[in-house]
Amino acid sequence: MGRSGRWTPVLAALAAAAMVLGACAKPLGRPKPSVSWRWAYSTGGIAGRRLTPESEHLAVVYMFGGDSLLLVARTPGGTDSTHYHITPGGGTAGRDLIHYKRGINVLPPNDTLQYLRKVGRDTLILSDRCADCYEHTFVRIRY
């Protein structure tokens, strides 16, 4: 399947989610994740692996709604959602924490708490809370 064909189901799921979340424009607090983020890669694990959409045959998009609803679209696999909140400076070394009401089993591990960091305007990094866990890098989707 071509590169654009792989993203068609994910973008269709996001369009449906945008209608549901469209009226929710409340600010998220510091830092402010944008509406939609595409998973670019993950690094870590006990073996120091690098996971990519190509290596895992998986396309993932996170959409953060202003009403504290996170929608996750993945191909294959459909969509999932959970509520979240951000605690600025609540982690070790003053890092921001994102708390999920329940874990979403998309990228390892299936945890309810991650470190949150924005790098510039177009990169979002979610890091797991252990020494040999994963750091997940997302890039902002511009429509």
Image (cartoon, grey):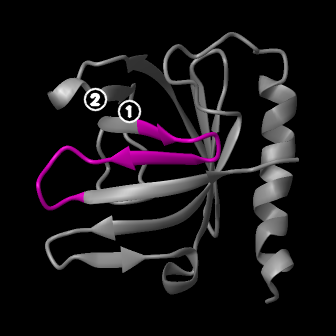
Q: Say which element carries label 1.
A: loop
Q: Percent x, y for residue 16?
A: 85, 41
Q: Nearer the viewer, residue 4 or 105?
A: 4
| Displayed quadrant of residue 49 | bottom left
Q: Say which element carries label 2.
A: loop
Task: Identify the disc placed on residue 21.
Answer: none
- Name the residue beneath numbered marker 2: 95
Task: Identify the disc placed on residue 102.
Answer: 1
The magenta segment:
117-133
Q: Nearer the viewer, residue 134 or 19?
A: 134
Q: Residue at x 81, y 27 (%)?
A: 20
Task: Residue type at mark 2: give it.
Answer: Arg
Q: Is residue 43 above or below residue 2?
A: above
Give the spatial CA distance, label 2 vs label 1.
21 Å
Please, which residue is most extreme toward the bottom here?
A: 1
Please, which residue is most extreme toward the top here?
A: 26
Q: Is residue 42 left or right of residue 68?
A: left
- Identify the mark nearer the N-term, 2 or 1: 2
If the image is split into quadrants, where does the N terminus sit?
bottom right
